[in-house]
Each structure stands twice: as structure tokens, then as C-alpha cells.
Amino acid sequence: MAPTHRPNQPIRVLFSVAQTQAVQAIRDALKLQPDMEVIAEPQCSGVQLLLLLRRTELDVLVCQPRPGRVPALSQVFSEHPHHTVLAISADGGEIVLHRLRVD
């Protein structure tokens, strides 16, 4: 699959996380960025999220991965190697940016 981001177009962000202060701060910061747009904020996880990712054009996924639950980040990256994933812990205390190097 080719990279999803289009030059000179906004970076498309999909939020699939529970509402926390950390998430709200990230969302507020994105609203101030002219080159980024939130395209969806679905209230789904697991298999429903994987199905949504298959039919949605996005560049960045903001999610709260949970150990042992689908989708694991490895599964997201195996299907969508060009996506960037911003993973936020359930309490918002840890935020990690994941990006594969795809040459």
C-alpha cells in the first residue's frame, strides 16, 4: 500500500480514544494546525476499528492500545504500514509515537 498522505493537503487524523485531558489537549492543539484535520472520532475499538481503518483514508491514528486486545499495534501496522500511530495510555500518563520505516 502506498503512503496515504498527499502533498500540500492536510494530514488526516482519526481519533479512537476515550476522552481524557491528554486527548483533549492533543485535539485542541490539532485544531490550531492549518495542515492537520480530524477526520473522524469513532466510538469503536477492536475489530470494528480495523474495519474502519480499511475503508478510511488517514495519515495518523490516535488510539489507546490495550495489551492482549485486538487490534494490536502490530496488526494495524501489518495492514497499514504507512500510518503513524499516536498511542495514549488509558490514564493519559504515557504517550508514544509509533512509525514504521518503510523504504
Image: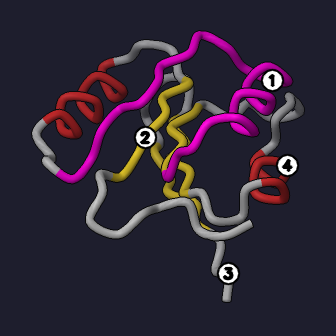
* Figure check: 39 above or below 97: above
Residue under label 4: 75
**How far apart are the two marked residues, 1 and 4, measured between alpha carbons?**
11 Å
- Asked if residue 45 lies in the magenta stretch, the reply is yes
Residue under label 1: 46
Residue 38 drawn at (x, y percent): 35, 32
Q: Nearer the viewer, mark 1 or mark 2?
A: 2
The residue depicted at 17 percent of the width and 33 percent of the height is: 31
Mark earlier in primary sequence (1, 2): 2
The residue depicted at 71 percent of the width and 28 percent of the height is: 52
Mark earlier in primary sequence (4, 2): 2
Residue 32 drawn at (x, y percent): 10, 39
Q: Secondary structure at mark 4?
A: helix
**How far apart are the two marked residues, 1 and 2, measured between alpha carbons?**
18 Å
Residue under label 2: 13
Q: Nearer the viewer, mark 1 or mark 3?
A: 3
Residue under label 3: 102
Q: Secondary structure at mark 3?
A: loop
